[in-house]
Image: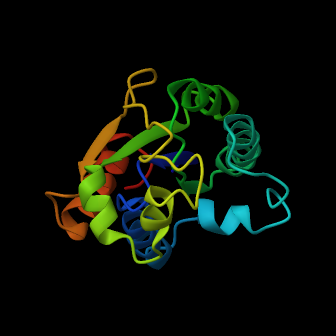
Amino acid sequence: MKGATIWFTGLPCSGKTTVADRVYSILKEKGYKVERLDGDIIRKSPISRDLGFSKEDRRKNLERVAFIAKLLSRNDVIVLATFVSPYNDIRRDIRDIIGAERFHLVWAKCPVEVCIQRDVKGMYKKALAGEIKNFTGVDDPFEEPTDPPANLVLETDKESVEESVEKVLEYMRRHGIIE
């Protein structure tokens, strides 16, 4: 099997992490070399804790993560990366850093109203109250993945977690990432 980066994009609380964590557990259980890179964890690490949430800081954060994903995936590790990554130009740069042959974009598509209902941390509530600035889905846009387009779309408001997980695993099988 070959290394690859499965890059999950979508609004905060769209289900990216939930699906990727389950895929990770399944792959780990089957003996695959797999790593998780998650926005919440990376933001608290020495890699990116110096950055804010301006467009430029988001770009720097994602470029750093993309470089790590590139190193891992070229060494036959399956990387499951979960980052809002809201802009097409940044996703294009991520693909270019990782390499188009190893980059697979998965869009956790979910209406903002559903994401707000799922928000256990209260981030949307704070953003709507003006306490958090530049929050994707409130006062900062999420651009639908068109360039590059999503390789796989998960409709996480309509599918169960298990249905979304199976779609990801089937995609990975079809593309020779897993058996």
Residue lying at 69% horizontally and 41% vertically, measured from the top left: 54
Of residues 44 and 124, the one nearer the viewer is 124
The answer to whether 8 is drawn above or below residue 100 in the figure is: below
Residue lying at 37% horizontally and 56% vertically, measured from the top left: 179
Relative placement, left or right, of 110 versus 77 is left
Q: Residue furthest top?
A: 147
The mark tally for this picture is 0
Q: Quadrant of residue 115?
A: bottom left
The answer to whether 173 is drawn above or below residue 122 in the figure is: above
- The picture places residue 152, in percent across and down from the top left corner, at 31, 40
The answer to whether 161 is drawn above or below residue 142 in the figure is: below
The answer to whether 171 is drawn above or below residue 18 in the figure is: above
- Residue 38 in view in this figure: no
- The picture places residue 49, in percent across and down from the top left corner, at 81, 61
Q: Residue furthest front?
A: 129
Of residues 169 and 18, the one nearer the viewer is 18
- Residue 1 in view in this figure: yes
Relative placement, left or right, of 124 versus 169 is right
Q: How is the image coloured?
A: rainbow
Relative placement, left or right, of 109 versus 160 is right
Residue lying at 49% horizontally and 48% vertically, measured from the top left: 6
- The picture places residue 9, in percent across and down from the top left corner, at 45, 46
Residue lying at 55% horizontally and 32% vertically, measured from the top left: 91
Of residues 112 and 42, the one nearer the viewer is 112
Of residues 36 and 169, the one nearer the viewer is 36
